[in-house]
Image (cartoon, rainbow, N blue to C red):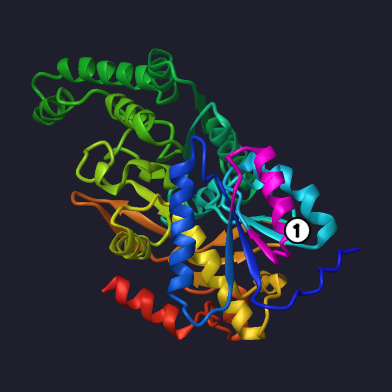
Amino acid sequence: MRPTPPPQPPGPPTVALLLPLSGPAAEVGRDLLDAATLALFDAPESELVLRPLDTTGSPEGTVAAARKALQDDARLLLGPLFARSARALAPVLRPQGVLALAFSNDARVAAPPVYILGFRPEEQVARILRHARREGLGRIALLAPEDAYGRRVVEAWRRLAPTLALDPALVLTYGDDETALADQLRLFTAYDERRRALTARIEELEALADDPAAQQELAQLRARDTLGPPPFEAVLIADGGLRLRSVAALLRYYDAGAGTVRLLGTMRWLEGGAAALAGRPEFLGARIAAQDQDLARAFARRFQTVYGRKPRPVAVLAYDAVAATVAVARRRGRLEPRDLLTPQGFRGFAGILRLRPDGTAQHGLAVYVVGAEGLVLVEPAPQRFDLAAASGAAVGSSATPNQKRTMASAMR
């Protein structure tokens, strides 16, 4: 039986912000706080009260902050940031009938009344793999690191395998040892077999010295490293930073990289910014599933205009969470947090979003191709969810005119 939410106290509704305002993640917490404050500033007619509470970035600090928020009659909790803290929060909130919207992307800690707002790797994997199938790519491989992120990607891959006819043999996980990685990729790409095939064919053609066609083919093959395609047509690399660059470079070295197969990626590719990928030959033509980059840039500009610094990407979730909360409170005339669970969802700077019954968030993701000067849109992010489209209700219809003006002006 669902707990009955506590009666609303008189006065403006209070929303608690559970953020790491001290400790190692204090700078991230500051970005989240500033983004939440900015969203409230962009809706000046709102009577919502934001109450920042420091979690110190720990589960213990999060539980203490949550108890303080409940004592202060908070109707909704926004945060915490980390998965381990979100996991500790559910037992505190469940008896109270109060919801929390955490900024984590870890589906393993999603358990109502704790919902997660982050862009989950699982939905990015599904988006890019379905795109690849629509593009006619048959044999798709997966390369993933042996860490928590990689394990989640592999698990998502396996769940999708029956639907998308994915070959479980085309999965490779790897650690931090670059020598071992090179050896693994040499086997995975069947480099030696293809190298031997090239040598054998060259020997055949050399024996046909009087055949002009054979000599023409021979001249072409002598400029190549291998003969025949690798065992896959596309490969999803679920990694970022230096390891991503190492994997992409090794694939190219083994004649199984960009230009030979289609590289696919998740939002982890963008950890160093899209500019870090632009024009690099090992990434040209790769496809990435990501949030709407126009909206992401618009939020960054808006934030920087007000605060004089660039926000961390996660900050957009705090802005959108406050904007959605303001919208549902205005529509009903009071704050009923369960109105945030509407299947139509909401639209914000992170694109469209709706909270699912399992506690995860569903986002609308776009697909981009890495070009010489940056990311180029291939498939736009959806503007509404299926249910909203079927019912004729536009996603984000709860956004205020002021919020719409703000987003429009930021994107100009």
Residue 385, can we see it?
Answer: no
Asked if residue 217 is positioned above or below residue 124 in the image, the reply reads: above
Residue nearest the viewer, comparing 112 with 356 = 112
Is residue 156 in the magenta section? no
Q: Give the residues in magenta.
A: 53-77
Residue at 27 percent across and 24 percent down: it is 253
Quarter of the image containing the C terminus? bottom left
Is residue 64 in the magenta section? yes
Q: How many marks?
A: 1
Circle 1 crowding by C-alpha within 10 Å: few under 14, some 14–19, many from 20? few
Judged left or right of residue 412, residue 150 is: right
Residue at 30 percent across and 53 percent down: it is 309
Quarter of the image containing the N terminus? bottom right
Label 1 secondary element: helix
Judged left or right of residue 407, residue 258 is: left
Where on the picture, by quarter, is residue 3? bottom right
Judged left or right of residue 183, residue 81 is: right
Residue 196 picture location, percent across and down = 32, 16
Residue 388 picture location, percent across and down = 60, 78
Q: Which residue is mark 1?
A: 71
Where on the picture, by quarter, is residue 258? top left
Residue 399, can we see it?
Answer: yes
Residue at 52 percent across and 74 percent down: it is 384
Question: Which residue type carries mark 1?
Answer: Gln
Asked if residue 22 is positioned above or below residue 134 in the image, the reply reads: above
Residue at 76 percent across and 50 percent down: it is 90
